[in-house]
Image (tube, rainbow, N blue to C red):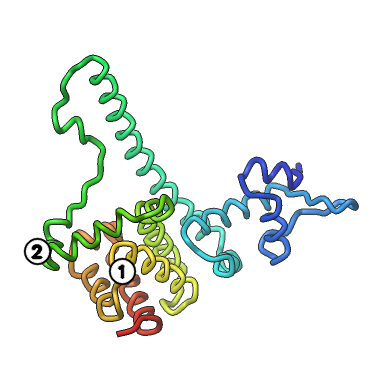
Amino acid sequence: MAWSIAEVARDSGVTSRTLRHYHAIGLLIPARIAPNGRRYYEQEQLLRLQQILLLRDLGLSLDVVAEVLERQSSASTIEVLGRHKEWLLREQLRLGRLIRTVDSTIGNLRRGDEMKPEKVFEGFEHNPYEAEARERWGDEAVDASYRRMQGWSEQDAELARTGYPRVHEGMAALKAEGADVRDPRVQELVRLHHQITSLFWTPNREAYKGLGQLYLDDERFRQNIGGGDDSVVQYLHDAMTVYADTHLSA
C-alpha cells in the first residue's frame, strides 16, 4: 500500500515542501515516483519519517539526523523509541494531574467552595534547587535568572520545559551505540544543552565544565539525568568538557 505526498503531509503534519526537501537531500526517498512526478510512500518510508521526527524532536539538526539513521540498527531504533515513550508517558501523567487540578479548581469556584493549599497546587512542578541556588550563588544571581525567564517567548518556555529530557534521552541512546563524546551527533546535543542552560544564565568555559562536574557530584542530578545509570551522567560530563574547551571562552 502506498500513500501520496499529499496524504503523508496531511497525516504527519509535515508540509509537502519539507518532504520534497527531505527527498532532495537524500534523507527520505519515496518508494516510487509516478510518471507525472508525484511521490508515493510506503510503510518503510513512513517509519523512517517517524524516526526523523523523533530525532528532530530531540533537537538534532538534519545532517546529524541523517548520520544517526545511517548508523542506527533496528535494535537501537527500538531503544530510542522506548526511551521516548517513557518520557511521553511521564508527561501524560503530569499533564493529567494538572488537568484534574484545573477541573477541580473550576468546580470549586463555581460552587463557592474553598480548596486546601495542597489541592490548589497539586500536579505543579516546583524547583527543588532554588533555596540551595540562593545559598550557593546568591539572591541576585537567582533573581537575574527569573528576570530572564520573564522575557521568554513561548518557544523558549517549551524548550526549557522539555529540552533537558530530550538531551538526556539522546545522550543515553548515543552512548548505548558507542559513539565517542567528540562525535558530531553528541556535540550537537551538547550545543542544545548549552542553549537551554543559557535561557537561565550564560556559563563560560569554566562555569559550564563546573556544571558538568556538579551533575556528577550531586545524587539528585545523577538520578535525574541517568535514571540510575551513572555512566550516562559521566558521558554527558565528558561531552560538556569537550564542548566547553572547543566552543566557549574563558
* Foreground disc of the pair 2, 1: 2
- At label 1, the amino acid type is Ser
Question: Which secondary structure lies at badge 1?
Answer: helix
- What is the x, y in percent for residue 12? 62, 45
**Residue at 39% of width from left, 42% of height from top?**
89
Residue ID for mark 2: 135
Residue ID for mark 1: 231
Q: CA distance from mark 2 to mark 1?
A: 29 Å
Vertical order, 102 against 38 (above or below) = above
Left or right: 143 with respect to 151? left
- What is the x, y in percent for residue 38? 82, 50
Vertical order, 131 against 240 (above or below) = above
To which quarter of the image does residue 19 belong? Answer: bottom right
Left or right: 35 with respect to 139? right
**Residue at 54% of width from left, 66% of height from top?**
61
**Residue at 47% of width from left, 77% of height from top?**
183
Q: Earlier in the sequence, mark 2 or mark 1?
A: 2
- At label 2, the amino acid type is Glu
